[in-house]
Amino acid sequence: MVEGSGRRRASQAEFRRYLVMALASADEARLWCRYAEDLGYAAPDNAAAWRAAFEEVARLLQGLLARSDQGREASSPDR
């Protein structure tokens, strides 16, 4: 996401693409937390806290995506 927003000339579509990648990364991180717990590398309480944090990140990213989509619809030539 930083790469997408850090570029001054990035288009809205490109920023959206970075949001989608960030959302996928948050989902992947949640899965790795589960693996770490299942394999005994992380205590269950720690892994649950990490998963909850990544779930919150995913919710925030989904909100940004929804707002990004609203902005695209509002600026669509069909409107």
Image (cartoon, rainbow, N blue to C red):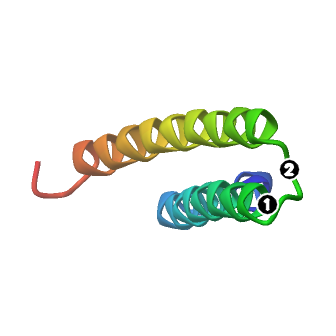
For residue 25, the mark is none
Residue 46 point in image, percent of width and height? 81, 36
> Residue placed farthest to the left in the image?
78
Residue drawn at x 56%, y 56% is 23
Give the left or right position of residue 52, taking residue 50 as reference: left
Quadrant holding the N terminus: bottom right
Residue drawn at x 33%, y 49% is 69
Residue 9 seen by the camera:
no
Residue 43 seen by the camera:
yes
Q: Which residue is mark 2?
A: 42
Q: Residue type at mark 2? A: Ala
Q: Quadrant of residue 49?
A: top right
Q: Residues within 10 Å of mark 1 (few under 14, many from 20)?
A: some
For residue 36, the mark is 1
Reading the chain from its start, which is encountered first: label 2 or label 1?
Answer: 1
> Between residues 28 and 62, which one lies in front from this camera angle?
28
Residue 72 point in image, percent of width and height? 32, 51
Secondary-structure class at tag 1: helix
Give the left or right position of residue 73, taking residue 9 as reference: left
Q: Quadrant of residue 36?
A: bottom right
Q: Residue type at mark 1? A: Ala
Q: Are marks 2 and 1 in contact (CB under 8 Å)?
A: yes
Residue drawn at x 28%, y 48% is 75
